[in-house]
Amino acid sequence: MKKVVTIPFKTFWALCLGFLALPILIFFTGYLRYYIGIPLALLFVAAYALSVRDCAKDQERSLLKKEETDIKIPVGYLIGFAVTAVVLSLVSGVGEFIFTLNDHPYRRAIMNDLVNYKWPVIYDYSTQTNPAVIKEIGRKSGTYAFMYYFTYWLPAALVGKLGGSFAANLALMIWNAIGIFLTFIAVSKIIGRASFTVPFVYICFAGLDVLPNIVHNFVEWDCWNGMEVWAPVLAYMSNFAELTSVFHQCVPCWLIMTMIMMSYNTRSLGLCGGMLFAYSPWGVIGLFPLAVVRAFSKPMRAGGIKGAVRNLVSVINIISCTPLLLVYTPFYLGNHSSTSIKGFFWEFINNPGLSVAVYIIFIVIELAPTAVILWKTEKKNAMFIAALIELMIIPVYKITEANDFCMRSSMAARFILCILLARYLKDLYDADKIIVQKKLKRKKKDVVKLAFTMLAVILMIYPSFVMGYYVLGSEFTGEPHNAEDIGSYGNINKEEHTWNVTHNYISNDYQEAFFFKYLAKK
């Protein structure tokens, strides 16, 4: 721990940007017509280079001292972060090398098809062999396109095209671990130093879902649909649940959120925030208001409001956001069947009194404990207040049957709370060491606050502990893996997945979509 590695901020910024930009560049050059994709890729590379050159300057374009910007990490923490990132990526099921939860049959099918099909991925109904699937689809001929936010898989898929499926899955697991590792370092930069609280909170952050689950053991209710889906219509997921289900959205989202929070100017804010559009259209909805708050927060208003606006309308932001919007907007609009279910959450409960009760209980369980812990130290922090407000507004509206809007658009705001909680626990640990050394006594109110904090943090661990226990226990007892339950969207193995595939991952009328008419390779 005594040996410290110094990471130049420019180097670290370049690594984070590169991790996020490479899959997008592969999409531009691999999915688009060459006369469109190559120029857009070159624009994006230019934005990358300009951002790296500019990242260590303040809002006034003055170069900051290296002592202010460089990241110092003890070697022991670097090793610990790296090992934790790899183990977490493996245990959360990325690459499907272990017993998996949730949506991993769909994740494996994405990888299979990106490796085995020509890009853009187009299927033919005649390749379906399961009679039950053919019956449910209701047709045996015609073509359909794979349309989903799959950008995160592309580097590993390229590896797979050269080295086969195993190489692709291994590359995906390692790629995911790199994203987690970079986020550990970025959070350490934000909170002031490396600490064990960084990976701990990254993995375990959640609401107090244990409480409704305990109640459900004694008083069952029909709307209960799982450990973290205990409320009708509404759900905020724990960090570990996100990692086991939508790693392709949450890992880049959380890294982007840390980059926005540790940046010294806003001239790359559009580049950083805009890249999330390639990974999670839901996530970028929640990120946008927070990015605006960051852009006009006190540290970024050195030149006044006009200066802040001028920095936002930078060459970097313009030449990066434009390609992202022009390409990914028509791509996502090509498949709108998954968003057909939408409305205010009370429209799905049909009982005004119950709707109010559900909302209040949901906020108390998922948001209030962390807000109470952090309030005294963060109440003047604009990002903290913005995150709380956003997390109270998001549950009001529902989109998709599973309410992806609630679960995924909340990722950025919840991760702000995660970072601030890691800092609070780090500072608490440091203060405790000083108190022990000086043999001082705590005030009564401090003891109560400490007890509440420790109890809340312990209870937060519940979802991660249960899921981790179930994954590892099932692996050790030899439970069969379900990764190949789908196999390919061009030939679905098990019919129970047919509806979800046809409503969320494919487009039948893709040939009429703007993206395939004018942008995609033929």
Image (cartoon, rainbow, N blue to C red):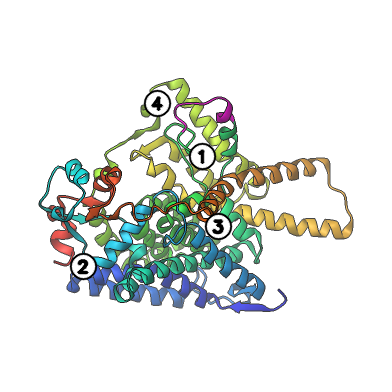
Above-or-below relation of 151 to 394 = below
Labels 2, 4: front one: 2
Q: Position of residue 430 (x, y in %)?
A: 75, 59
Write down the region rendered in magenta. 215-224
Please name the residue that numbered disc 4 is placed on: 349
Please name the residue that numbered disc 2 is placed on: 118
Q: Secondary structure at mark 3?
A: helix
- Give the mark nearer the N terminus: 3 vs 4: 3
Please name the residue that numbered disc 1 is placed on: 227
Say what amino acid the circle numbered 2 marks.
Lys
Labels 3, 2: front one: 2
Q: Secondary structure at mark 2?
A: loop
Instruction: Report how far apart the C-alphas of labels 2 and 4 lie in the structure.
Output: 45 Å
Say what amino acid the circle numbered 4 marks.
Ile
Above-or-below relation of 67 to 90 = below
Report the residue at 41% width, 21% height from top.
351
- The answer to which quarter of the image holds residue 42 is bottom left
Q: Position of residue 230 (x, y in %)?
A: 49, 34
- The quadrant of the image that shows the C terminus is bottom left
